[in-house]
Image (cartoon, grey):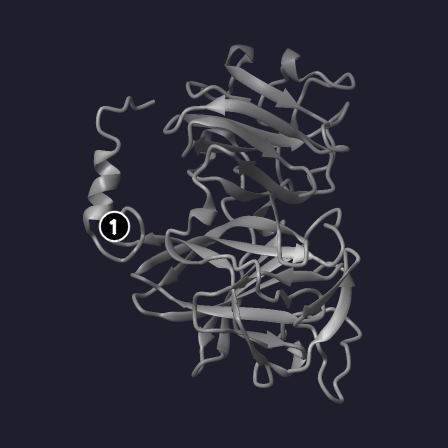
Amino acid sequence: MPALSIRVLGLLASVSLSWGAGATKPAVPYEPDPSAEFEERGLTHYGANACAGATPIYDLGAFGFNFAGATTDGPPHAGCVNASSAQIWRDVWWRWQSPVTGVVKIETCVFTGIDTKLAVYAPSAPCNPSDEHLLVCNDDVCHTQSSVTLAVLAGQEYLIRLGRYGLVEPAAAGSGALVISSDAAPSVCDGGGFCQTLHLAGIPTASNAHYRTADDFFAPASGVIEGLCWKGRYDLHPGPADNFRVTYWSDAGGTPGAPIASYRQGSGLGVKRTALNIVDSLGVPQFEYGAWHAPLAVALGQRLWVEVRNETAALWFWAPSTSGNGALLDLHPHTGWSDAEHQANRAFCVDFRSACAGDLNGDGAVNFADLNAVLSQFNSVCP
């Protein structure tokens, strides 16, 4: 395939972006075929209306909320006063068991347009919690959305309350996502189960609003995929925000077959972007993206394709890898994958959790690597 040369950061770069003879650039961003039978996996574990029935959650990630029909269940707090209001109206509740020890961030920033108010209570907090149980409370950090940071212990259960701001009780309306993240968490990019490493000298492939790229992998065991990590870079510089969509496909004789599940950033897909402080052979800065989503069940040896796209107006490119058996670039997404062009492998890692209880590192086998993981924790103090 002839390559299109574009100027990147003042350098002339050859990237896999050509349209080919007679091809035209799509006039509108790609959207999945509405007739395709697959699940658009959105938010899960919605907050409960009553504190007594708080939704249990056990992980980092994005959790849904919808204030439609919500009442005001909890009390006002002196520690929550902002703009003359101490109450958290139309509240919904979770009991979150932390998987990490360290500092976590809990927020609604950019995940809703509603004016939210957020509180987190101590592990011993009853319903309804009093001021002495309140750990942190916030109204506005990011415009009219909320964000708190606090130190937590792995295994401890924290009561989370999210609602609306108002001098008087506002309407029972509005929805979005509550996102819990932490730098203390094991990185999705550790690649438990499968990983294709970054190749800085290779050619990146376009996967954005107009084109899509997919790479394949085999499930190392029966279990679930809970996240993905990938590497990439931008045309000139990072945009103000990403808009990633991750779609898993079945295999149809060496190409993506039927879509299985799709996760969109801000609606079931949490994404953390990190600058790697390295550049490729053309001097272009590289980024790493760690993402988590609702579990996707897979079977031992199952071949899947994963499509990663940044559906922003800015050009985004998926970084290459030397491992694997090749990827596909589709310049005409509306026509399916049949005319996709073969490319080098892409850099990504799958966050895989084996269904085998003893397989601690997710490689599909119980072996000395798992034993070493246990032995390395001997004599350590549990939180």
Residue 370 placement (x, y as % from top left):
23, 45
Disc 1 marks which residue? 359
Residue 150 is left or right of residue 253, and the answer is right
Asked if 258 appears above or below 317 in the picture, the reply is below
What percent of the width, then of the height, locates residue 3? 69, 77
Q: Front-most of 373 and 15?
A: 15
At a point 76% along the width and 89% down the height, the residue shown is: 22
Q: Residue at x 24, y 47 (%)?
A: 369
Seen in the picture, residue 49 relative to 220 is either above or below; the reply is above
x, y percentage for residue 42? 56, 55
Residue 245 drawn at (x, y percent): 60, 59
Quadrant of residue 82 within the rendered picture = top right
**Amino acid at the residue labelled 1:** Asp
Nearer to us in this view, 47 or 296: 296
Q: Secondary structure at mark 1?
A: loop
* Quarter the N terminus occupies: bottom right
Q: Is residue 41 left or right of residue 138?
A: left
Give the mark count: 1
